């Protein structure tokens, strides 16, 4: 039971962290989170 709670907490923290990073990147003007060209894309189709 305790192991399940710990694993669920870790997974929830990862999901919340990913959502928080996406929101922060969108506020900074990043077009696609995780893309190495996100602020310097020359083409709209570069990041899909």
Image: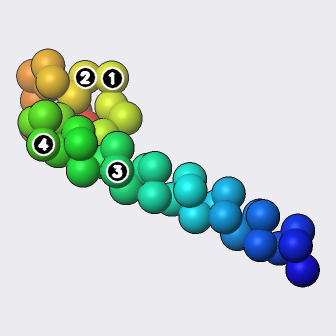
Q: Secondary structure at mark 2?
A: loop
Q: Secondary structure at mark 1?
A: loop
Q: If the image is split into quadrants, where does the N terminus sit?
A: bottom right
Closest to the camera, between mark 4 and mark 2, is 4
**Label 3 packing within 10 angstroms: few (<14), some (14-19), many (20+):** few
Mark on residue 36?
1
Label 3, on which residue?
A: 20
Q: Nearer the viewer, residue 25 or 8?
A: 8
Looking at the image, do the residues carrying marks 1 and 2 touch, with CB atoms under 8 Å apart?
Answer: yes
Q: If the image is split into quadrants, where does the C terminus sit?
A: top left
Looking at the image, do the residues carrying marks 4 and 3 touch, with CB atoms under 8 Å apart?
Answer: no
Whether residue 32 can be seen here: no
Label 4, on which residue?
A: 27
Looking at the image, do the residues carrying marks 3 and 1 touch, with CB atoms under 8 Å apart?
Answer: no
Q: Which is nearer the N-term, disc 1 or disc 4?
A: 4
Rendered residue at 68%/57% (across/down):
10
Q: Which is nearer the N-term, disc 4 or disc 2?
A: 4
């Amino acid at each position: 039971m305790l192991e399940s709670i710990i694993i669920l907490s870790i997974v929830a923290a990862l999901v919340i962290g990913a959502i928080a990073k996406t929101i922060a990147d969108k506020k900074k003007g990043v077009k696609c989170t995780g893309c190495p060209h996100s602020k310097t894309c020359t083409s709209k189709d570069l990041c899909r």
